[in-house]
Image: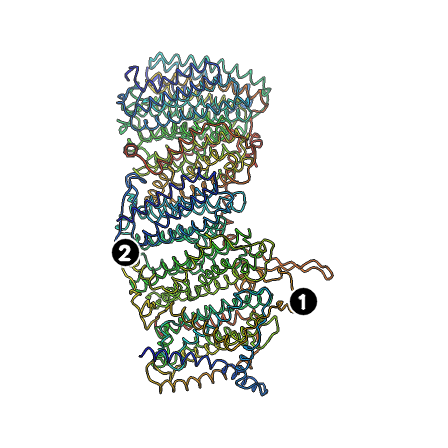
Amino acid sequence: MTELAVQLGCVAALLAVAVVAAPLSRTPRLATAIIYGATLIVCAVATASALTWLLLHADAAAERVLPIGLPWLGAHLRLDALAAFFLVVINLGGTLASLYALGYGRHEHAPHRVLPFYPAFLAGMNLVVLAADAFSYLLSWEFMSLASWALVMAHHRDASNRRAGYVYLVMASFGTLMLLLAFGLLAGSAGNYDFAAIRAAQHTPYVATLVLILLLLGAGSKAGLVPLHVWLPLAHPAAPSHVSALMSGVMTKVAIYGFIRVVFDLLGTPDWSTSGIVLALGGVTAALGILYALMEKDLKRLLAYSTIENVGIIFVSLGLALAFQTNHQPIPAALAFTAALFHVLNHSLFKSLLFFGAGAVLSVTGERDMDRLGGLIHRMPFTSVVFLIGSVAISALPPFNGFVSEWLIFQAVLQSPQLPQWGLKILVPAVGGLMALAAALAAACFVKAYGVTFLGRPRGAATLAAKEVDRFSLAAMAILAALCLLAGVLPGLVMDALAPIATEILGSRLAPQSGMAWLSIVPIAQSHSSYNGLLVAVFIAVSASLSFGAIRLVSSGAVRRGPAWGCGFTDPVPLAQYSAAGFAQPIRRVFGTLMFRARDHVTMPPPGDIAPARLRIELHDQIWERIYAPLAGGIMAASVRLNRMQLLTIRGYLSLVFVTLVTLLLVLAIWT
Amino acid sequence: MHGLAFDISHSLAGGLVLVSFMMLYQDRLTSLLNVFALHAVMLSLSVAWQALIQDAPHLYVTAAIALLFKAIIIPVALRRIVYKLGIHRDIETVVGIGPTMLAGMGLVALSLALMLRVTADADALAREDLAFALSVVLLGLLFMVTRRNAVSQVVGFMSLENGLILAATGAKGMPLVVEISVAFSVLIAFIVIGIVLFRIRERFDSVDVSQLDVSRGERT
Amino acid sequence: MDVIADIAVQGVQMLLVFLLAPLLTGFIRKVKARLQRRRGPSLLQPYRDLIRLLRKEVVLADNASWLFRAVPYVTFAAIWVAAALVPTFATGLLFNWTADLIVIVALLGTARFFLALAGMDIGTSFGGIGSSREVMIAALAEPAMLMIVFCVALVAGSTHLSTVANYIASTAVGLRVSLGLAMIALVIVALAENARIPVDNPSTHLELTMVHEAMILEYSGRHLALIEYGAQLKLLLYVSLIVCLFYPWGIGVFGAGPVAYLAGAALYLFKITIAGFLLAMFETATAKMRVFRVPQFLGAALMLGLLGTLLLFVSKGL
Amino acid sequence: MTLSGIDPVVGVLLIPVCAAVVLALLPGYKLTAQLNVLASLGSFLCAASLLVLPRPAPGPYILVDDLNIVFIVLNTFVGFTTSLFSASYIAHELETGKLTPTYLRFYHAMYQIMMFGMNLAFMSNNIGLMWVAVELATLTTVLMVGIYRTPAALEAAWKYFILGSVGIALALFGTILVYMAARPVIGEGQEGMIWTVLVARAAGFDAPLLNVAFVFLFLGYGTKVGLAPLHAWLPDAHAEGPTPISAVLSGLLLNVALYALLRFKMLLAANGDAMPPGVLMIVMGLASLLFAAFMLYRRRDIKRLFAYSSIEHMGIIVFAFGMGGPLANFAGLLHMVMHSLTKSAIFYAVGHITQVKGTQSLAKIRGITETHPVLGWGLVVGVVAIAGLPPLGIFMSEFLLVSSTFARSPWLALLLVFGILVAFGALTLRLTGIAFGRPRGSRAPVQASYVPMFAHLALVLIAGVYLPAPVVAWFQHVAKLLG
């Protein structure tokens, strides 16, 4: 089992790189090249070995115990199909992020605050997936959070980044403590924290339910489940863009890995009702996440919110898998589970791509605010193409990969009538509706993102100066775009690669897909449903070129350029274009009034006054205002109240001692 | 003989408690110091009696220390300080005398209730003594709590120490180390308090220094 | 050999929808004109319009990007493929196995996505207003559509149109309340998706009320022709979708031979004629509603779909 | 105990005493500072040698067993590193004229006496002697807290003194009561105070008397541990004294009192029908944790901030020992050691920061990582460690404590987690303010010896990832002793 050794070697190498990065970063340019080059190589190696494991001997599992970590336990490290898959996701992301950063990192103005933590962050994520006992799992989990926190704080002079880092760190620690409680429950008072022991132990339904809820709190807060998502849109954009890509595209997946590992692998089968919780949470998260994104005008924050949506989708299909699994319906369970993993892969691909694109825009224009961008398609032709591909893919449109996974999830949703419980029968279609809503809103959201950022006319001076980004960044984005298309047209191969994981975790798998006629995928049965990404893509290409050719024949190819039709007054100022907020206005009016208590305030100047009319949009983040603000306020109030105890006179303190003594004596006198 | 011995030591210890109550009753520092001297005298008497009936000569030393330091030197010195600070007139009880008295009663009752549970094989003398000692300690603490001024806090603290000594001497055959440590700690206590008071006097008038919190930014 | 035949039949189908689409539009216009006591243009007018547009030169706005020029082809192709996937005169054709109902919906989504982008490309307010409203309507229509899919799939146990059509044609299912509800929902969705009255008015250029037209305002010449053609194909697609889902009777089963196919084709023509007539009547009878009434309208469709599904559970006894 | 010259016990006890005398006489700070370091090193080496050399049999006064050797070694080690830190710190104090050479002599002598007192407290087998030693240590620290003679410092010292001596009194009363309880069984005289004898025959003691005794001892020594609501002296004493003393207070003196508590807890546990001491410790521990956690938010003074975090951690430790059981006790011991190392390291960093910035006010200290990277990141690592984040030692102890508690009594664990989380929020909030943001205050380079700080942090880091087997076995043994 050399792969495990290779993986551990890679982790060690990453840590070593992190250590040498600190002194190196005195010479930024050199350090940037060396560090990112090194991480690029290491991650590539790790990806390769994990992939070979997943493809060749995925049914096996390699384990090894290192004499570190919890003394009487040691650090258990285990490589199985599930771990291998997530290692692929992590290290693929790491490889491409490093490649991207080779170019992007040159624009970094505080490299000494990024370079040491970047490899550590990657190492932490790898370790989480490899860990096979509670202690090393949580240790690497929190180490990952810590490294990413340091990266979020890289540009610490910006107060909003500091706030982001703070909220992030607190939420992360909350999540870890919840996981800690969960493992405490699983390990029992004897404290056998080894995953093998936990897997072997029998857990009562009560314990299983409690653990699942704790997992939803712990892993969910890291993954960004509503209402634990508040840190995510703050922290992800705050980091440098390649790190944002890793946090959004990969780290959330590590959280999902944690959920799968514990709930599906360690926990046995909990009560069916728990799957309802997961489903509902996932659906709400998907819909709310994308609604938040639609209200956003900061490009990177928009992407972060859309991450929340995708996490919701993944949790929906995990909930479906749980529902089927608890009702002993292996095939639909495998379908939902495979769909979830497929979407994990897809989201890691196109979200990284989109964040890279946002980073490219940021590095050439220095702007994240979409309302100051526009018309970039003329200045960054290549970036605009790959970003378009990413947008189509994330909007779940054929023939790209995003659609395949959502299609599979819908197929799983359509299996729900087989579920015996009324609750699920009624819940699942509703959640399906929520998912369809989320998908449509996602399309709207990315029409907005792409349209406002890349199309139209430049809105600011920063945009006019923009030019195409460097070669490394373009290469990284191109590879991702290609992968998006590839996974979209050849879904069967991916599903077959994922099958062993389902076998390992659920004990059931889908029928092998690669044997199907013309590479179409048939999750349940031919008569039931099937999809052939390749053919659809080919048909579209063929008919497009057909029509193109035909038109070339009949019509005149004449083209005349002229000013746009401006309804009388020509050449309005570019700012008169539809802004991000303006584009979202119809949807804001339909959904926002309920979700965000959104109000548009228009201040019209009096007649004769030439001052411009001003539009102010008032949004309230209900979740923050209803949950977090009161909590923080309560703690503050309590501390103010208690702080009076710091301000007593000596006599006051003495009387405290005195009262304590007398109370204890009284207790003694009464109780004994 | 034993009955008599018991009664005497018992009455002496009881007397100590009584004097503690008298201290609670005082609201002028000067008179308080007098009462404290009396307190010390009572203590040294009972210690001496213990030395007699336990024929433990080393206890005489303790008695002597108590008499010398607590009954004479310290009251005199404190009187000096009091006059120097010019606070020999002001009334500085926090709670009214009446409530304080009631609280004191409660404390004595509590200490009796606690000590009388002790199984009787610890001999009666010890039990009674402990009960009284405990009440003296608690009363001393109560005194410190109900007085505002640093000097009276010192006095209260020393009356508390007296209670300790009473207990220690009541504990038959307790090794010398304890008495020495008691005297030792009292000595240290006195010296340090003296220094600190002196310095405090030197810096600013009020001994109650809570307004420092403001300068320190803790009170906001 | 079979494969050749299959491809041939599929080709026929593609050609059929390709040729039929403008005719349907022309027919509807004609009927509407008649109902409004006008003589109206001839049935073939749409063909003439398309050809005229093809001949015209293209006027591009100054800052139109390559995307703006590529979009018409992409949208047309996507819609055409989608339309070719819907069984018209026969089920089980070659392409039917490559995609099911969800894919068809998604293909239309792709077309819409690119069209909305094109609306944003020039950077005029019209394009913006059109795109933003279009995506809003779509965001409401798609959940409703999924509910309909869900309802139908529950009845037929499949999302493949051919299977569904065969199943419903094979009179095993009697009249189902839930199917009726689903059909009404689908009609509403179709009206919205095709920018028909009461959601949108295809024949107006009154700026503030138009949605679809505003989006494509900057298009001209062959691009406009393609987009118009796409719209007509989409209309035909929805009509034949309704027909094949709810009135598949007489549809030719795969491999039944040319005769059955011809019968199926004839019946299909008959059905869409009726459908077109009804649509025209409906459009004449109703008025366009305000944009922000549309959510209620489509919300009704969603509710109907959900209701249909739940009723189905009840009738199946859960 | 054998009085042979090479007896390490004698070394541990006598070196400080002699050093104190010499230091009191010698002038000149350079020499004395070095001497101070030397003496601390000597006593540390003696203590370390106790690990390997055969231990003396428990005599009437001196006892060296598995439990207290942990404390002794830790104590002398931190004493040594602090003396190193204090050397560079005091130099600066002299330059700025906050201390005069006279006071400096006094300071060094007191430092050694304090070390002597603490070592004696750990080693004493006689509960009376232990009491004396603890008081000695306390009084010396009182004097050192007041050494700056500022109103604030004097007030702090005064507060510390009054509360401390009330604690003294209560502890003494408890000790007497223990003797009384033991007397009927053991008889009069010496024997009745020797801890080994007491614990051996505790079963026969008079339970009600023991209970009362424990209440007094708990409050008496608990005052020094800094348990809420007896904690009041602690923040001021930390804030107003010289920073090396703050380090020693947090790192060591609290442990001394804790050690005494543990001894008496074992005594009570040995007696069958006395009340379970755990309950009291759990309640007070949780109270201190929650109280300190909330108090952290309102702090304006950097040293007070970390003083309160000491209260919080003492609460956690006391809670752990109160829970008892192999895992919790192990966690408690580990947590105590890690806390001593980390907190003193933090105070080393804080000392230099306050010196270079010339203020203790949190509001005036910003962006340390930018102006003084080494110092700043050292502080960040320290606070991260104290906040219980991996890969540092406290994470391991909190992991064991929380998970084992949750399996046993969920509600307590939830309270514990809540407290930890609230404290975490406060600490990281302040850390964000101190370490990051646009720098404020002087950017002058600080002449500091980073050795002590990074030595401690390195130890904490290693312990967080890898605990050597012998240490583990030894801790487990001690945990078993604690029951």
Tell which subunit mark 2 falls on. Answer: A
| Residue B59, placed above or below residue C271 | above
Give the amino acid type for the residue marked by disc 1 in the picture.
Answer: Phe
Query: For mark 2, what is the residue?
Result: A56
Query: For mark 1, what is the residue?
Result: A569
Tell which subunit mark 1 falls on. Answer: A
In the rendered structure, find residue A275 and report the number of the disc placed on it: none
Which picture quadrant has residue B93? top right
Depth order, front residue of D14/D123: D14
Q: Position of residue B204 (x, y in %)?
A: 59, 23
Depth order, front residue of B191/D373: D373
Whichever of callouts 2 and 1 sits on the residue coming sooner in the sequence is: 2
Task: Identify the element where label 2 is drawn.
Answer: loop
Judge left or right: residue A123 versus residue A556: left
Give the amino acid type for the residue marked by disc 2 in the picture.
Answer: Leu
Q: CA distance from mark 2 to mark 1?
A: 67 Å
Depth order, front residue of B183/A396: A396
The outermost residue toward the right is: A608
Cβ–Cβ under 8 Å for marks 2 and 1? no
Picture colour scheme: rainbow
Q: Position of residue C257 (x, y in %)?
A: 33, 85
Which picture quadrant has residue A313? bottom left
Report if residue C87 is visible in the image: yes
